[in-house]
Image (tube, rainbow, N blue to C red):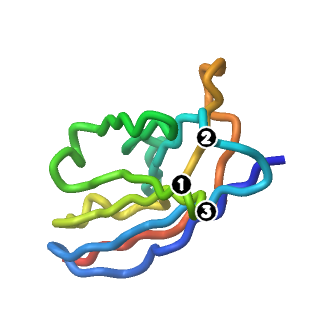
């Protein structure tokens, strides 16, 4: 069974940066789409960014475009989310997820990591 483990969350001041990591294990994710989502208190979970592991193609939510960068390291089986120019509205629990090529929904989810941006 596949497993995703996030790390790198924390408390940062507005304008600061954080890099989240998602370590994938237990199966081959090389053909998967790897996504980052977030959920703020009282709000629904929302899409942040996605990368296709095999091609490196990426897509972003409009709210993070130009500030966040998703990438992957094949050798480390890890996906990253570099977050710059953070805003208080970026405060949320961030989740890593994996979607197989034939699936409409994400098959695997991590446990989440808290990101708090103070003003």
Q: Which residue is mark 2?
A: 30
Q: Earlier in the sequence, mark 1 or mark 3?
A: 3
Question: Mark 3 or 2, which is nearer the eye?
Answer: 2
The answer to whether mark 2 and mark 1 are in CB contact below 8 A is yes
Name the residue located 35 percent from the left edge and 64 percent from the top edge: 91
Vertical placement of 111 versus 109: above or below? below
Q: Secondary structure at mark 1?
A: loop
* Residue 90, percent from left and from top: 30, 59
Q: How many marks?
A: 3
Q: Earlier in the sequence, mark 3 or mark 2?
A: 3
Vertical placement of 5 versus 36: above or below? below
Which image quarter holds the C terminus?
Answer: bottom left
Q: CA distance from mark 3 to mark 2?
A: 13 Å
Q: In the image, which disc is placed on residue 54?
A: none
Q: CA distance from mark 1 to mark 3?
A: 11 Å
Q: Earlier in the sequence, mark 2 or mark 1?
A: 2
In the image, farthest residue toward the right: 1
Q: Quadrant of residue 13?
A: bottom left
Query: Would residue 6 be found to the left or right of residue 63 on screen?
Result: right
Name the residue located 20 percent from the left edge and 76 percent from the top edge: 16
Q: Nearer the viewer, residue 15 or 54?
A: 54
């Amino acid at each position: 069974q596949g497993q995703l483990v996030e790390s790198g969350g924390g408390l940062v001041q507005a304008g600061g940066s954080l890099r989240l990591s998602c370590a994938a294990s237990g199966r081959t994710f090389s053909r998967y789409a790897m996504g980052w989502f977030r959920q703020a208190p009282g709000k629904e979970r929302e899409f942040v960014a996605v990368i296709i592991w095999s091609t490196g193609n990426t897509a972003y939510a409009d709210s993070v475009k130009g500030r966040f960068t998703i990438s992957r390291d094949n050798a480390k089986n890890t996906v990253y989310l570099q977050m710059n120019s953070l805003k208080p509205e970026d405060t949320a629990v961030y989740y890593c997820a994996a979607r197989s090529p034939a699936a409409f929904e994400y098959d695997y989810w991590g446990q989440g990591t808290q990101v708090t941006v103070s003003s």
